[in-house]
Image (cartoon, rainbow, N blue to C red):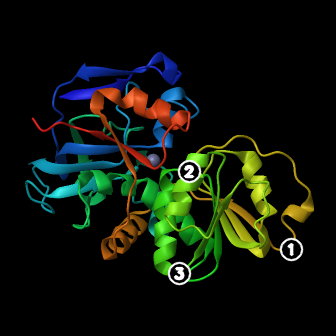
Amino acid sequence: MKAMVLEKQDLLENLPLKLKDLPLPEPEDDEIRLKISVCGVCRTDLHIVEGELPAHKMPVIPGHQIVGYVDKLGAHAKKYRLGDRLGIPWLYKTCGKCKYCKSERENLCDAPMFTGYDVNGGFAEYVIVNEEFAYPLPGNYNDKEVAPLLCAGVIGYQAFKATGLKDSGRLGLFGFGSSAHILLQICNHLGIETYVVSRTEKELKLAEKLGAKWTGRIDEDMGVLLDAVIVFAPSGELLVKALKKIAKGGIVVSAGIYTTPLPGFDYSHIYPEKTLTSVAHTSRKNVQEFLNLAGRFKIHTEVNEYELAEANMALLNIKYSKISGSSVLINQPS
Ligand SMILES: [Zn+2]
Ligand SMILES: [Zn+2]
């Protein structure tokens, strides 16, 4: 099979992902093999490729928003049939034994494996997964529409749940990439007002088009204090500034797996009763809950399409904020 393989972490300008021909992987026991049609491209892939995240498996095939069709079953796989359309997100496997796995917080598992990081992911033509960690996808989306929901959508939803908001209130979305543009539409659906902060005009325009209540730069006055902010941009400085945008009792949630250092701040940033936290990964329960929610109405995903061999370019465009919305790699049918 063809795959874009990372052999050594390096700056994207040096095109570290190389197109290779690899043997077809074989599913064992309760694993299944998917023939990949589309794989989303995410900022986390950028951090894996360039090395802000330490290397785990090397060489590795990145990619963790995989849409594919079951093409081979392991000897003991029984949940799905050949041809079923399934998705694979970032959470590839959990231990099932640690205190987090046993208390419905498997996103914090002590020994997790992540797709496209600890095991080969979706920048390829085929992938292997345990059947318990793959998900049927809502039928009201085609493959390239649904791929960005699998990480960008799911992570945004995990962060949204951390805010405690349900069906009213004012939510800030700071940094308006793939995750935020999906979450904004969920907020519209649920009746939550969104306040979008971004440095790029393109992103602010998209936010406005999608129905944000307010859009602007971080130093502009919103005229109100927010109940919660989710910071999607990997900026410690923005996290601290967000604390000044929330009302007492409010919460700032960092949705990133990586962020620049936080500058020092005085007590007034967290008093009275302001919370600063982060979300890490997702549980299977939240992935399923999010996919169910997405199936009830149509989330519009702004999708930039690339061929598999263009993965370096797709990531470079995310690095330099050259695109708005989500990016996907598409496999030509063979
Ligand atoms: Zn565990
Ligand atoms: Zn991701």
Is 249 situated left or right of 289 in this image? right
Q: CA distance from mark 1 to mark 2?
A: 32 Å
Q: Looking at the picture, tell me which residue is in the foreground, 209 or 242.
A: 209
Residue for badge 3:
191
Numbered circles on residues, count: 3
Of marks 3 and 2, the one in the foreground: 2
Mark with earlier residue (3, 1): 3
Mark with earlier residue (1, 2): 2
Disc 1 residue type (three-letter) = Pro
Residue 302: x and y in percent read: 40, 53
Mark with earlier residue (3, 2): 3
Question: Regarding mark 2 in the picture, which secondary structure is present there?
Answer: helix
Residue for badge 1:
272
Q: CA distance from mark 3 to mark 1?
A: 27 Å
Of marks 3 and 1, the one in the foreground: 3
Of marks 1 and 2, the one in the foreground: 2
Residue beneath the point at 38% across and 24% down: 59
Question: Regarding mark 1 in the picture, which secondary structure is present there?
Answer: loop
Kindly indicate whether the residue at mark 2 contacts the one at mark 1 (C-beta within 8 angstroms): no
Q: Which mark is residue 162?
A: none
Disc 3 residue type (three-letter) = Gly
Residue beneath the point at 17% across and 36% down: 332
Residue for badge 2:
203
Q: CA distance from mark 3 to mark 2?
A: 22 Å
User: For disc 3, does the CB lie below 8 Å from ligand 2?
Assistant: no
Residue 14: x and y in percent read: 48, 16
Q: Residue furthest top?
A: 14
